[in-house]
Image: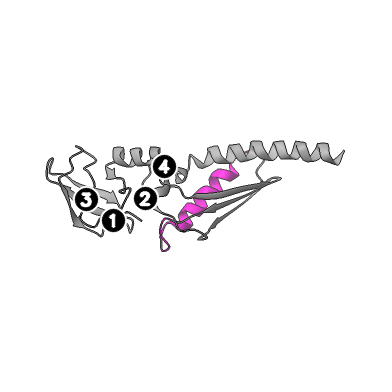
Amino acid sequence: MREVRDVAESRTETKLLDRVREALRDVKDPEIPTLSLEELGMVRKIDVEGNHVSVRLLPTFVGCPAVELIRGMVAKRILEIEDVQDVEVTFVMDVAWTSDMITHGGRRKLSEFGIAPPPRQFSPKSAPSCPYCGAEDTNVVSLFGPTACRAVYYCKSCQQPFEGMKFV
């Protein structure tokens, strides 16, 4: 009889895990509200045990000032899910977040938002293509953008300044 109950509990937990994953797609990065934490590659692990949910996230930068805000946003959203009674959100650093973790869809959304996605490979002499006109004739204005993960560039073609995610 215990084995049947274990199978039923496992199915219930799997359904809850699916709902948690779906809910996390709603949690947007506070600095780039067009991207979810999942699209940024910040979701490291989700565990469901009964009605308890544990989410492990990777910070994009160790000193990210939005960590506590993100923790609260994730906890709030998951607690909105029926059957969730308790949630634990932790930031882990067992692996370092890299810009390669941004999904293909996330890279597309960054560009649509006006932020050049990070290059696939680092080159100190290259600047990203302009997210507005697609021109490659761009240069860096400042390696220090509005956040630690972005730099400011200038497009010589359309003459627009733009931000770009740094390669990490």
Q: Kindly identify which residue carries mark 2.
A: 31
Q: Who comes first in sequence, dot 1 or dot 4?
A: 4
Q: Amino acid at mark 4?
A: Thr
**Looking at the image, which residue is at 21% across and 38% down?**
134
Q: Who comes first in sequence, dot 3 or dot 1?
A: 3
Q: Does residue 159 appear anywhere in the picture? A: yes
Distance between mark 3 and mark 4 Cα atoms: 20 Å
Distance between mark 1 and mark 4 Cα atoms: 22 Å
Above or below for 33 versus 146 = above
Q: Kindly identify which residue carries mark 4.
A: 103
Q: Where on the picture, by quarter, is residue 109?
A: top left
Q: Kindly identify which residue carries mark 3.
A: 127
Is residue 113 rendered to the left or right of residue 80? left
Q: Nearer the viewer, residue 81 or 13?
A: 13
Q: Who comes first in sequence, dot 2 or dot 4?
A: 2
Q: Is residue 66 magenta?
A: yes
Q: Which quadrant does the N terminus fall into?
A: top right
Q: Nearer the viewer, residue 24 or 92?
A: 92
Q: Is residue 64 magenta?
A: yes
Q: Who comes first in sequence, dot 3 or dot 4?
A: 4
